Image (spheres, coloured by chain):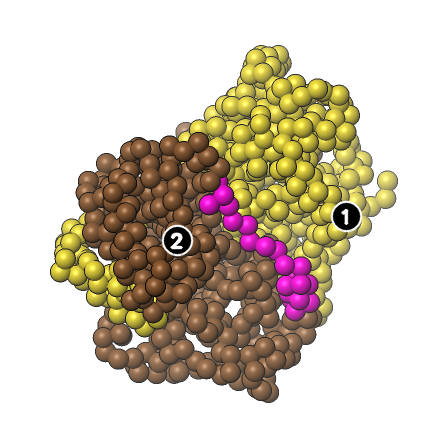
Chain colours: A brown, B yellow
Amino acid sequence: MSSVNIKRLNSADADFQQRLDELLAFEGAQDENIEKTVVGILADVKARGDAAVVEYTNRFDRLSVAGMAALELPKAELQAALDGLPAERRAALEAAAQRIRTYHERQLGAGFTYTEADGTMLGQMVTPLDRVGLYVPGGKAAYPSSVLMNALPAKVAGVKELIMVVPTPGGEHNALVLAAACLAGVDRVFTIGGAQAVAALAYGTETVPQVDKIVGPGNAYVACAKRRVFGIVGIDMVAGPSEILVLADGSTDPDWVAMDLFSQAEHDELAQSILICPDAAYIEKVQASIDKLLPTMPRRDVIRTSLENRGALILVRDLEEAVAMANRVAPEHLELSLAEPDAWVEKIHHAGAIFIGPYTSESLGDYCAGPNHVLPTSGSARFSSPLGVYDFQKRTSLIRVSKDGAQTLGRIAATLADGEGLPAHAQSARYRLDA
Amino acid sequence: MSSVNIKRLNSADADFQQRLDELLAFEGAQDENIEKTVVGILADVKARGDAAVVEYTNRFDRLSVAGMAALELPKAELQAALDGLPAERRAALEAAAQRIRTYHERQLGAGFTYTEADGTMLGQMVTPLDRVGLYVPGGKAAYPSSVLMNALPAKVAGVKELIMVVPTPGGEHNALVLAAACLAGVDRVFTIGGAQAVAALAYGTETVPQVDKIVGPGNAYVACAKRRVFGIVGIDMVAGPSEILVLADGSTDPDWVAMDLFSQAEHDELAQSILICPDAAYIEKVQASIDKLLPTMPRRDVIRTSLENRGALILVRDLEEAVAMANRVAPEHLELSLAEPDAWVEKIHHAGAIFIGPYTSESLGDYCAGPNHVLPTSGSARFSSPLGVYDFQKRTSLIRVSKDGAQTLGRIAATLADGEGLPAHAQSARYRLDA
């Protein structure tokens, strides 16, 4: 097998900035046909409810059910899936769930109130969402870890009803996914998918209750449908291809770094794996490890395509420059594979998650360290956060102005309302003066 | 002047649910022409930068500047606007700014870390966004209070650079808006607007730096442009028409309630004002106040149209039912105009802001109570929150697995990765076992 032809960049080169920009450039194409199909399905489900969902599901998932009732999984089936797991796998899933729960409990937001000298009370109330829909893809991308990572924060937040949708093309159920749903406390499961599932959750049907927010990954149709129903319901971010940036000083076994790059690249051909390192000789060692290890990987074709099309090994002057570059990239996953990583952490301003030190492979975080694996992609860590409990809570402002407070605030408000040309606002404030 | 023909609903009527649904139904039309225009402007500014922004600005705002330099306001001009305000207005603006700052400082999120028995550290780091763009509309909807409400949370969060854009059609500057920008600590101001301003902020030009997030209200072109650039930068929510729901027990002066309904209705003809009350006689009193007071209002035409097309007076059985209805509506603004309001607050699960007791007119919250006046509209309080400091901060997960921790976590992760068919993930975890 030939050497993996992964891009080499050098920050000392004159065209470096341009090459880095090209490497990072990624715009998901917006397909007009997908858009049109999705708009049609959304409107149809909104108008015809269950009947439309059943028709699309029979057509797209090659089923022949008579009605929606046949598309809901009884709770006993989830429990049976969990009970049927091999002991080791069940223990691993339970351990992961427990660790994810413990971490997310730290994110629980609390409200506040304070009372001013004149008796006016101000505050903020934090409440969970009532009902959330969780989209889980069918087929090859059906990951039980993803069920845990999406469902558990919602449950920790106190969401009352969590409704999962998962397509079962050809009627095939994924036992590990159902077991994860059981463990995570999912309340109802419908075996529907695609834009029709998103529509059912967003508008509600006779059988599927309307939710307040839809989370979870999906294909281009699902992503398009989520964007379209945003506003009627909340949605999580629409994720781009997954990425890892490994920042290495040369102290980690190069096989480890190569495998960490592989573990991102094996997701799909658009995934991006980048190594940044100030040690040219070490970069050669990682290249040698890549070439040596790739033939041993079952998913070597996907890994090779991903590394050759989207990956890079970048030589930099020093770690300071490496950190500046990491902040420029704002990666989804950042590994600090450094002998002394701690001092560098606070210099990182933009990353979804930071994996600190050589023992912290991204894969540990993907499954069971505790923090969420749903992270901002494509540089959006500049302005967004990992999925968390806060995504399933919302805040309400509280204002209780006392009679005394209304005298002070009323004058300020009336003056400003006059300035903005809103006389009813001003009058409404003035009514409370000396009343 | 004729009596205001505002809709009457009664929760005891057979068709009540249907009428309530119709009252609340609002879908902003998506105009294909606006979409097409915006897509063109975005692409043009992305490709040609300053030159395109200058051309669009000269054309749409009837200016004739030679270059971008002429479209940046020097800081001295902001200071001059503040210094030039009448003393009372300046004092009101400063008092409002101080109260808004104080409230929002309570929202500052902190990170956390914790270390497990085997030395593994988990945590979450909270950091401010680097650079934020603030859109401020020109013309009649240019509100200095809106500048304060958008800019101050960003500054409290620690955003390093806050860039305001505000169109100046015909070259007219709004002194109160510039004064508010000065007070709020806005760093740079460009007199540009529309989709071209959104594009400049999202992509950056030779002169306008690229931002990480764009906030602030705008017209249909601005809203469309913000939706389009979402993903490249963060955006705040795209607001629908403003609404108020007043829940009254009959103990408040009906003139006050009428004026509170007016203060929402005077915003624009699509604004929605609803009264819910269990006391039929009191509803008649409010109607009488509406009829009596409307002729005195300078913006009476807008108020009448809004009340007649979108408003309602709803008779309910009791306050329990009123609260259930408020939760169903999930209003942007909820006034609890009750003699004993406190016990009812925690029964409210969905509202942008709750104005508690008869002295708390919405107008006090709009300007100076302290909480933000940018609130979720159209029922989106079910899943979203007031604009806050948290919108200008993001979180990064921290994971530092110890050598001991890698033994435990590596086995769990490898087992789960095997189950998901991701062998590089499994191998990456196994490398850390007994290493």
Q: Would you say B250 lies left or right of B31 here? A: left
Instruction: Report the number of numbered marks.
Output: 2
Task: Work out whether residue A193 or residue B26 is closer to the camera in this orientation and state it.
Answer: A193
Magenta highlight range:
A21-43
Residue indicated by mark 2:
A5
Residue A114 quadrant: top left
The overriding secondary structure of the stretch rendered in magenta is helix
Does the magenta segment cover residue A35?
Answer: yes
Q: Residue at x 26, y 80 (%)?
A: A86
Q: Amino acid at mark 1?
A: Asn
Does the magenta segment cover residue A88?
Answer: no
Q: Amino acid at mark 2?
A: Asn
Q: Would you say B429 lies left or right of B385 here? A: left
Q: Quadrant of the C terminus of chain A?
A: top right
Q: Residue at x 53, y 75 (%)?
A: A192
Q: Residue at x 53, y 44 (%)?
A: B232
Task: Work out whether residue A104 or residue A90 is closer to the camera in this orientation and state it.
Answer: A90
Examine the rendered structure and indicate whether residue B335 appears above or below residue B417: above
Q: How far across and how far down the image is residue B394, in percent? A: 41, 42
Residue indicated by mark 1:
B33
Q: How far across and how far down the image is residue B47, in percent? A: 63, 37
> How far separated are the C-alphas under marks 1 and 2?
46 Å
Q: Would you say B127 lies left or right of A355 here? A: right
